[in-house]
Amino acid sequence: MNDILLLLVALVVILLGAELFTNGIEWFGRKLDLAEGAVGSVLAAVGTALPETMIPIVAILFSGAAAGSAAAGHANEVGVGAILGAPFMLATLAMFVTGAAVMYAGRRRATGDQMLVDTAVLGKDVRYFFVTYGIAVGAAFLPQQFAIGKLAAGVLLIVLYGLYVKAHFEADPTVDMEDLAPLRFHRLDRRARRELPAEPRLRVINLQVLAALACIIVGAVVFVDAVEHLSTSLGVAPAILALVVAPIATELPEKFNSLLWVRQGKDTLAMGNITGAMVFQSCIPTFVALVFAADSWSVTRDSLVTFASAGIAFVATALIFVPMMRRGRLNGRTLLIGGVLYLLYLGLVAASVAGLI
């Protein structure tokens, strides 16, 4: 009962953080004259990706390094599972939830379930994801003795992510003050409210963003801890936790942020938050695995089901976004494909845990 209560409290904290974060990060982009793609695909994506990024980093760099060889190997495997789980969840479950939100909101939108997205921004994200995640997964097929190849792949991923961020920040600014809801923390800055009633100061924006990130990270950590205890008490296998349960918990910020932006009609921010996080997750956490857990980042008979999640992520992304890039439009119903593939992979994991495959 205590674990369920903790789950609910953590959920409320994450929701509060997501609402503060989406509001603050839009104002941050406005202050710096950043493009909408930079705000959604870089700033929001990186900020909300922190909770799920912490799990593999802690598992590989701290838990694995501090333990003995057997325990270290187990910690590395948990880290690898979390790294692979993040893009998988984003490409499947997060897409499905966002698509369902668009379908629901479509009854009140003039365009129905057609999303008002910048297809050039999303297309850029998807192309980077295919390249970076393709390099990362391809490195897992290298022989164990070819460690230098995995190191080179990790360095290349960092370079590519730098180019990705540079491309977004060089785009033309599209965030206008008229489109923004009032900054939540602006009411706390009485002096600025008297001088500039409509526009908050950058320091107050920064404070709100940092407070929101703190809520998101603390909420996600508490959520994951409660899920772990609940899973143990229910007898759920650790493989399910590493591959499915933990990523669901830590991907909540992206889902909530995207739902908030869909409700406000800011579809590019909503989708860019997810696709940008996919690019981030395919580069930064994967770099940690390639450099510090190269032996565990390998496709073997034992890890085949784990790495199958990467294949599902590729298929889901292709089915959703390749038609968008061809037709120049994206519909909410197309995102529902992610839910079907998510259930398909859950069945694969369940069959593996039951020893059927």
Image (cartoon, rainbow, N blue to C red):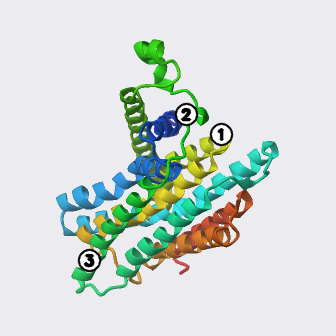
The answer to whether residue 146 is above or below residue 234 is below
Mark 3, secondary structure of its residue: helix
Taking 9 as reference, is 178 left or right?
right
| Element on which disc 2 rests | helix
Residue under pointer 1: 264
Q: Closer to the camera, 119 or 236? A: 119
Residue located beneath label 3 in the image:
152
Residue 203, given in percent of the width and then of the height, sits at: 35, 28
Which disc is residue 177 wearing? Answer: 2
Residue type of the residue flagged with mark 1: Gln
Q: Residue at x 54, y 54 (%)?
A: 272
Q: Amino acid at mark 3?
A: Ala
Mark 3 or mark 2: name the one nearer the start of the chain. 3
Which of the two discs, 1 and 3, labels the residue nearer the N terminus?
3
Of 141 and 184, nearer the camera is 184
Tell me how far mark 3 sits from mark 2, CA to CA. 43 Å
The spot of residue 87 in percent (x, y) is: 48, 63
Residue 78 in view (yes/no): no
Question: Dot 2, crowdedness within 10 Å: few (<14), some or many (≥20)?
Answer: some
Give, as a three-letter code, the residue at label 2.
Met
**Residue depicted at x 51% and y 33%:** 16
Q: Tell me the crowding category of disc 1: few under 14, some 14 to 19, or many 20 or more residues within 10 angstroms, Cα based.
A: some
| Quadrant position of residue 204 | top left
Residue 213 location (% of width, % of height) = 40, 39
Mark seen at residue 147: none
- The mark lying in front, picked from 3 and 2, is 2
